[in-house]
Image (spheres, rainbow, N blue to C red):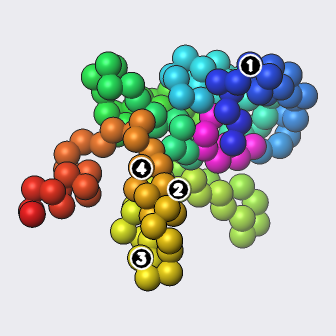
Amino acid sequence: DLHVDFEANMRHVLDFVPHPSDALIVAGDVAPTIAQFTKVMKSLVAKFALVFFCPGNHCLWVQRSENQTSLAKFFELLYVCDTLGVITYPVHVGENVYIAPLFSWYNPAFVDTGTTDQLSRHRLRFFDVTCLWPIFLDDDQATDEKS
């Protein structure tokens, strides 16, 4: 997690020493805004031979006033990556070695209600209220509509 929305983290990442023959895997939680994300990825691409990315929940946060869903933001991030040369697909990098960024998400239904306390279930259910999914991906709304 880079969390460059914190100024100290942004400075640290922008000051990374170049490693022009190395690959870097950026495994989520880069930044909550496209502008911050773009700035960081542009810097990393200039310093590493290969930069791989898969999104974290913070990358998909949206403000309700943005009139955008997290899915739309996900595709916007992929477009930025494609434009900058950041890799978001499986690549063969060496003998019998592949790097395959995964796009996945958690689901509150994964919680074992028999072994997890109520507070933990509540935290998971409301973990990412700043992510906004289209109705066809929103399990809570789909469940509510069936009731």
Query: Quarter of the image holding residue 131?
Result: top left
x and y, in percent, of residue 54 in the image: 56, 46
| Residue, disc 1 | 7
* Front of the two marks 2 and 4: 4
State yes or no: residue 73 in magenta. Answer: no
Q: Nearer the viewer, mark 1 or mark 2?
A: 1
- Of residues 113 and 103, the one nearer the viewer is 113
Q: Does residue 75 appear in the picture of this structure?
A: no
Q: Amino acid at mark 4?
A: Phe
At label 1, which amino acid type do we have?
Answer: Glu
Please give the name of the residue rendered at 42% of the width and 36% of the height, measured from the top-left corner: 130
Instruction: Give the mark nearer the N terminus: 4 vs 1.
Output: 1
Which residues are drawn in magenta?
24-30
Q: Is residue 1 above or below residue 117?
A: above
Quarter in which the C terminus is drawn: bottom left
Check disc 3 and report the residue beneath it: 113
**Among numbered discs 2 and 3, the one appearing first in the sequence:** 2
Residue at the spot of label 2: 102
- Closer to us: mark 2 or mark 3? 3
